[in-house]
Image: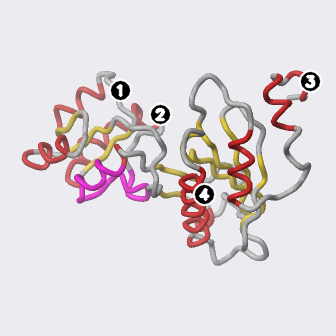
Amino acid sequence: MAKKFRSKKYREAAKKVGEGKRYAADEAVALLASFPKAKFDETVNLAVKLNIDPRQADQNLRGAIALPNGTGKQARVIAFCEGELAEQAKAAGAVEAGGAELAKRVEEGWLEFDKAIAHPSQMRHVGKLGKVLGPKGLMPTPKAGTVTEDIVAAVREFAAGKLEFRTDAGGNIHLPLGKRSFDNKKLVENFEHVISHLKSLRPQAVKGNYIQKVSLSGTMTPGVLVAVEQ
């Protein structure tokens, strides 16, 4: 979108950003904090461009990560499990927990949740929900840590804001890092945690610079490029 069509606050913020300049993480966060604020607590978004080919199975990165300082948003989690484990899942923060009866409820259209966790024993019920949960990105999967025997820990982490991620067709990963109301130090810690985790996932086939471009932005702000060591 051309700058002339942007809001006055956006244009004011854009003037502070050096064109093409890449800032150290703490400088980038401080610059972001100096931008005019919206009337709501904006999300701070991280965008990372990786030098990968997502068409190759070993380079299509996917996983889940819990940020050290959270994201500032609680998630509604349901857990597919039974008996005492279901009670423990509710105690850990699940809005609903159960087996076949919960699967039927979801199949009939109940979708008032943000994340679904499943015990492996429940996949006989959950597997039938692919057409309902798949298109909404809610289908439990081992790669994302949402199919697990440790239901209680998973519920607690995802309810607190644990994030799933995967590369898009262009090799990009987008994640929320927190809120603009966060202390700068907390945002930097979340940023460094994500970058360190992505570095640990570097595919062996990648040659040259793995992380090509990193940007931080608020919901209503321009992006700030961040310098990252390879």
* CB contact under 8 Å: marks 1 and 2: yes
Q: Residues within 10 Å of mark 4 (few under 14, many from 20)?
A: many
Tell me which residue sits at (72%, 65%) in the image: 211
Q: Is residue 58 visible?
A: yes
Q: Quadrant of the N terminus?
A: top right
x, y percentage for residue 95?
25, 33
x, y percentage for residue 105?
24, 26
Asked which quadrant contains residue 179, the reply is top right
Q: Is residue 64 visible?
A: no
Q: Which residue is mark 2?
A: 136
Q: Secondary structure at mark 3?
A: helix
Query: In this picture, is 126 found above or below 167?
Result: above
Asked which quadrant contains residue 139, the reply is top left
Q: Which residue is mark 3?
A: 4
Q: Is residue 154 magenta?
A: yes
Q: Nearer the viewer, mark 1 or mark 4?
A: 4
Disc number for residue 111: 1
Tell me which residue sits at (83%, 24%) in the image: 6
Relative placement, left or right, of 149 versus 158 is left
Q: Mark 2 is on which residue type?
A: Lys
